[in-house]
Amino acid sequence: MPTSKKIQPVKYVSALQGAIQAKCPRCRRGDIFASSTYSFTGQKMHENCSHCGLHYEREPGYWYVSMFVSYAFNVAEMVTLAVATYLLTGSHSPWLYVGILLGIIFLLSPFNYRYSRVVLLYWLTPGLNYNESYAEDRQP
């Protein structure tokens, strides 16, 4: 008597949740990066999604655009930190600002590297959208 396996419906993952977890933008199941944000092994990216097979680098030089996204992240972080430093300390010493900004930007650089690529894949690449059929489990 053959037994049929019931396929469990795929839990929907929102774009924000998928981006925060750095999942594939097409299926939101496979990981984009092979390591965590802050690891001693570096920021290693997978070339393809382990679930749906999407090739992440859409064309040669594709990741250059993520430098502009990273620049926007850095500007936003620096302005926020400069205002926060002024409000918290009231200091007018440029060396205090330089020290705090360079230190925090250095600490946030792995975050900026990772999420500038995630933002590029999720929201700045035309034609790359979530597809529920790719999110389903494949039959053996």
Image (tube, grey):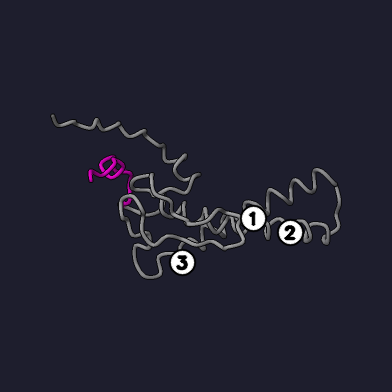
Crowd rating for badge 3 (residues with CA inside 10 Å; few <14, some 14–19, many 20+): few
Q: Tell me where residue 29 sits by quadrant.
A: top left
Residue located farthest toward the bottom when viewing the structure as drawn: 60
Which label number is shown at residue 29?
none
Q: In the rendered structure, which segment of residues is drawn in magenta?
A: 127-140
Q: Is 60 above or below relative to 102?
A: below
**For this rendering, which residue is in front, 69 or 131?**
131
Q: Is 1 above or below relative to 26?
A: above
Query: Residue 22's spot in the image, x, y percent?
Result: 47, 49
Residue behind mark 3 = 64
Please report contact status of discs 1 and 3: CB closer than 8 Å, yes or no.
no
Amino acid of disc 3: Tyr
Residue behind mark 1 = 108
Let me know if residue 132 is in the magenta part.
Answer: yes
Q: For the point 68% across and 48% down, which residue is it? A: 80
Q: Secondary structure at mark 3?
A: helix
Please report contact status of discs 2 and 1: CB closer than 8 Å, yes or no.
no
| Image quadrant occupied by the N terminus | top left
Crowd rating for badge 2 (residues with CA inside 10 Å; few <14, some 14–19, many 20+): few
Residue behind mark 2 = 103
Amino acid of disc 1: Leu
